[in-house]
Amino acid sequence: MSTADAGPEPGWVHATARCVAVIDTICRWSGYLVAWATLGTVILCFATVYLRYVIGVGLIWLQEAYIWTHVVVIVLGAGYTMMTGGFVRVDVLYSRWSVRRRALSDMVMTLFLLVPFLVIFGMGVWTFWSASYTSDEGSLNPGGMGNLWMLKATLIGFVVLVGLQGLAFVLRGLMVLAGHERHALNHGGHGADATL
């Protein structure tokens, strides 16, 4: 623990920590949503298989529904996964680094890799989504689900949630580099939820 952690925190650290806590709460709730969507995916998939192979009834919209919920799980779970350190990185190096070095690494990678990716991806997603919304795009399959733009909107959710968590990485990094190491996120599933 640094000496700066021993005394009261400056106002900017307190405000920054509150902002990070709000972002983490949003991402945690997206994780809860994803957990329920995972259950929904399993139930819809089971119903599709049961109806098709036991009852002999195939419903295209039901097949597409479990694909939609699976997309929700993957896309909207990214912010939560990032918050808990579930993405792949070279832990051989990262786990041996000091808290300050990990915070600096998170900040640099967020600013120089994640932010440009999200800007370019977000612009493409917006074009992709708005074209779908304008044309009221539906399934290509007869009897499939309509309003495909709703599914494509989850990509906007991806950009927002991952962008928010990227902001939290930068804010945490600033606090840690200023000597307030208690605000560091313990990545890699090693008690990450305990520090939130």
Image (spheres, grey):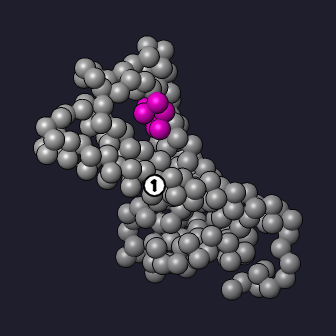
Q: Which region is colored magenta?
A: 150-155
Kind of residue at disc 1: Trp
> Which residue position holds label 1?
36
Q: Is residue 111 visible?
A: no
Q: Is residue 88 left or right of residue 176?
A: left
Most extreme residue toward the top is 135
Q: Residue at x 83, y 73 (%)?
A: 9
Main SS, magenta residues = helix
Query: Measured from the top left, where is residue 19 in percent x and y?
Result: 73, 57
Circle 1 residues within 10 Å: few <14, some 14–19, many ≥20:
some
Q: Is residue 190 above or below residue 15?
A: below
**Picture quarter with the C terminus:** bottom right
Q: Residue at x 61, y 74 (%)?
A: 195
Query: Measured from the top left, where is residue 190 in percent x and y?
Result: 48, 78
**Picture quarter with the N terminus:** bottom right
Q: Is residue 120 magenta?
A: no
Local SS, label 1: helix
Query: Measured from the top left, where is residue 22 in percent x and y?
Result: 69, 57
Question: For this rendering, which residue is in front, 65 or 176?
Answer: 65
Q: Residue at x 50, y 66 (%)?
A: 84
